[in-house]
Amino acid sequence: MTTTPAERQPPSVLIIDDEGGILESLRILLKDEGFRPVIALGGKAGFSLLESERPDIVLTDIRMPGLSGSQILAAVRERDPELPVVLMTAEANLQSAIDAVNLGAFHYLKKPFANDELVSILRRAAEHRQLRVENRVLRQQVARSGAAPERPVGRSKPWLDVLRVAETVAPTESTVLITGESGTGKEVIARHIHQLSARATAPFLSINCGALPEGLLESELFGHVKGSFTGATRDKDGLFAAAAGGTFFLDEIGETTPQTQVKLLRVLQHREVIPVGATEAEPIDVRLVAATNRDLEQEMKHGRFRSDLFYRLNVIALYLPPLRQRQEDIPLLVDFFLAQRARERGEGPKSLSQAARDALEAYSWPGNVRELQHALERAVLLSPGPVIEAEALPERVTERRSEPLVGPEPAANPTLETIERAYILWVLSSEGGNKTRAAEVLGIDPSTLHRKLARFGVEA
């Protein structure tokens, strides 16, 4: 039986230091803040309490006679890798902080530190501990049931080739760059990589880089400190920090500005972030998977994407084929989405008439798998009976189009921007000028579509 937050005991903290005055001060502080403190005078005493007390968090000084904090950390990592350890020291620098985190420390504090800073770190550690424990229990339940992570749907050779590479690199720590048209399933593949990795019990977090303005995006990515901008009333961890131990998926990374790209490059080079308004870097432990529907090599040639960031991201490259190149997957995807929708509605899955199925398999799906999913969702809602007829599908799917995408006489070698402009305008026209629906088909945020239309000079 899962306990609710109200039923859980306050998190226990084993405090280890060789100075009695510091121990007593920390004991009083943490008790007042809702923790259950247990104190140990020196490393040897702390080591002996590890087994008997089984704390939720360990807070230890590094420099102690007999047994150091680093040795305590090593012992904890050997016994319980999910137990967060926060190290304290009077002598700290960035390199020692990075070394400590690389050895498995949850955080690193330089004495003297503010009480609020310590309490904030310990609360994050308690949340981290609880999530790890819950994830472990869930994974054990899944293992006992014999279930395995669902493999993304598809049997075509192009799709199976993608899965083979993804499943080969999943156990590694390599950065992965996923490219392909919008709606081809880039986040699905990113999650599949995460689920098959050693980080599967830790968080999988994602963000759409094209959906937020630059200032807000940087705050979401890197965090911010209190007072760094109007409305910043408290310190906030960024998603890089929140994904500690797990995988962070950066979708539409091609939409980032040069300034944000510089900061992302620092993350990849030094494995650290500097929150907005802060002066000191914080080490991170996260695997990065990025995705884009842009041709980043062309973007580099036009000066819109940094080459050094591209080569840092492009360690493992995965190209996802469009749905029109994996036609034999359409029947499988149709059955999958109909069954999924039926589970959500608590009813049996609807079936397709032969005319509806023929229309789905004949359509070119410019919006790829996402457009197929939305078309089926619409059809289910518009079909009161158990059979979905072709008339319930979007008109663009059932009508036979003969006009070419770019024009009757396209240029011999059209640029990527020319093709992108023609494709966006074609989808927009197909949706009757409705920008919200067009953005859904394109698989981009409406704000991104507005920016693209403005760049093409067709906003009006």
Image (cartoon, grey):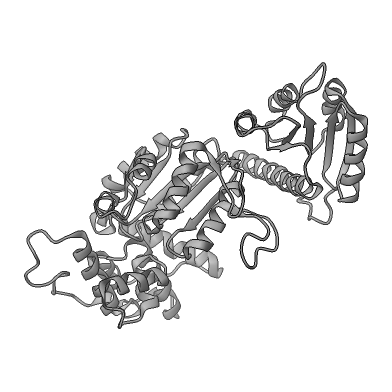
Q: Quadrant of residue 79?
A: top right
Which residue occupies the foreground of this view, 169 or 220?
220
Residue drawn at x 26%, y 79% is 429
Q: Residue at x 34, y 67 (%)?
A: 442
Front residue of this view, candidates 312 and 146? 312
**Measuring 82% from the left and 33% from the top, which residue is drawn there?**
54
From the viewer's side, name the closer residue of 193 and 420. 420
Q: Quadrant of the C terminus?
A: bottom left
Describe residue 112's horizontal placement relative to residue 307 as left or right.
right
Residue name at image x 79 percent, y 48 percent? 119
Q: Position of residue 293 (x, y in %)?
A: 33, 57
Q: Position of residue 129 (x, y in %)?
A: 72, 42
Residue 238 in sight? no
Residue 312 seen anywhere in this rendered image of the structure: yes
Residue 50: which quarter of the image? top right
| In the image, residue 273 above or below residue 50 | below
